[in-house]
Image (spheres, coloured by chain):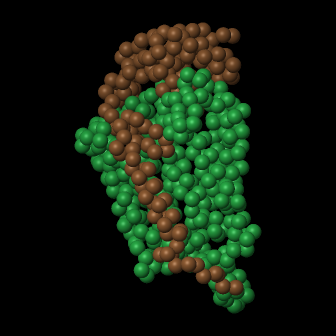
Chain colours: A green, B brown
Amino acid sequence: MNGGPATGQPRWFRPVRPQTLALLRLLVGGYGVVYLTVRWGHLVSFGDRPADQFDPVGVIGLVTDDPLSRPWITALLVLVVVAGVAFTAGAWWQMSGPAFALGLLAVTTYRNSWGQVLHTENLVVLHTLVLAVSPAAVAWSVDARRRRDIVDPNPSPRWGWAVRVMAMMTVLTYLVAGVAKLRIAGWDWLAGDVLRSQVAHDNLRKHLLGDPSSFVGGWLAGVAWLWAPLSMATVAVELGAPLALWGRRAATVWTGLAWLFHCAVLGLMAILFPYHLLGLGLLPVLATQGLVDDWLAAVEALSRRGPARRAGVPSAAHQAGQVLE
Amino acid sequence: MEPAAAPSWNRSRTRVWAVAVTVVAAVAVLIPLVRDPGNDSFPLSTYPMFTSTREPVATIDVVAGVSAAGTDERLSPELIAGTDEVIQAAALVGRAVRAGPAGTARLCRDVAARVAEGSAGGDLVDIEVRTDAYDTVAWFRGQREPLQSRMHAHCQVPR
């Protein structure tokens, strides 16, 4: 299985297996629930902030000019986490999909409505929104088990389009970040001085304000020749991101480089992008090229080989094809 | 039992939906390219971080604790601003400094109250809100004293 386009299908609607879309639902939904649970105390603490610090952005700015009290934030979080568990399990998908996606959007936008917009949660929110409007609960879900659905396990553009949109959103966010550097700083950004000064400034500010900082990054800011190549590599990864949709090799190379880029950001600036570093933000790029289909097929083949070897006969699932639940 | 035959993808409503979602998603993520880069939002961001040049000598608004021995002690973002996000803490301190003496005095009192309530910073006697100037690269090479320091507010930790 190479994940290539089915006969007569436009290249954009590259088919994938329904399990691949389901795997993305499990991983992205699971990440969202864990994120909300781990950050619960931080998110609830916004209820104690003075109202004059509230500076609503995005959808929160459309809804209210006033901050929420601690009980309202807690109630919202409970609802969103419950919806998130249902989302991840693929239960009551028609309701839980939009409810969790909109809830996660609301909570993370609220968190960013206090005077400084952060950039570590954008992609998980965008991916969740795409999953919510896709048939991501058609396999490996409570809904499928309850309805006893039987879904063709072969790759189809019916499931592939959503994976493709998620991959597109990943690469476009990098592209926008790369264009922003050239829009604001111009081609001078590639000379390295901007990045060098930012790394030194950011690390020192973190230290002075009592946060973990990268002494390695700060020390390397004194090595002037290093920063032009690092700046060029950064912009190359960001502006080159759309090439990752070109084919398997391009997707593999780019996701590897993007992951290394986030490792460098962590090492030099002590800035953690957990969704990207865990590979979840980058996985749709590989999935849309059929690589995740292949990994799942390999796992299935391995799992069939065990019982078949013990019994000495091909397994029933192998012979009859897999019924999805 | 065989899987039910699905209608042709090319004729399906799913395909129309897929095209619509693709177009909306692409436009939404790219729209920040035509916005003012400084007008950031969430989750559709202009990603303006690390795009502007910082001067070699940086002026940084800080809140520091002073121990009974007179030494300068770093405070955590939780103590400074009630958050574990350092960028939001920095934004809060910067806004207080821009607000003038009333803003920095209020911030100083708030921080002092958090220090008094918590177990961390038990030996701190005073809180200072300052703007310090450093040579950022030299700082990481050992030059730790600020080139300049301007005091905005000073208050005692209530005990």
Residue A159 visible, this angle: yes
Using the image as rendered, state which of residue A207 and residue A22 is in the foreground: A22
Query: Which quadrant of the rendered structure holds the N terminus of chain B?
Result: bottom right
Q: For residue B112, which quarter of the picture?
A: top right
Residue A292 visible, this angle: no
Q: Residue pushed farthest bottom?
A: A313
Image spot of residue A244 (x, y percent): 39, 62
From the viewer's perspective, tell me whether residue B13 is left or right of residue A195.
right
Give me the residue at 43% from left, 29% from top.
A204
Q: Is residue A278 above or below residue A251?
A: above
Image spot of residue A22 (x, y percent): 61, 65
Q: For residue B35, which quarter of the picture?
A: top left
Using the image as rendered, state which of residue A74 and residue A253 is in the foreground: A74
Image spot of residue B108 (x, y percent): 56, 14
From the viewer's perspective, tell me whether residue A226 is left or right of residue A45.
left
From the viewer's perspective, tell me whether residue B34 is left or right of residue A45.
left
Q: Is residue A19 above or below residue A51?
A: below
Using the image as rendered, state which of residue A257 and residue A1 is in the foreground: A1
Using the image as rendered, state which of residue A130 and residue A309 is in the foreground: A130
Give me the residue at 69% from left, 10% from top.
B159
Image spot of residue A199 (x, y percent): 38, 36
* Number of disc labels: 0
Give me the residue at 51% from left, 51% from top.
A126
Give me the residue at 57% from left, 59% from top.
A133
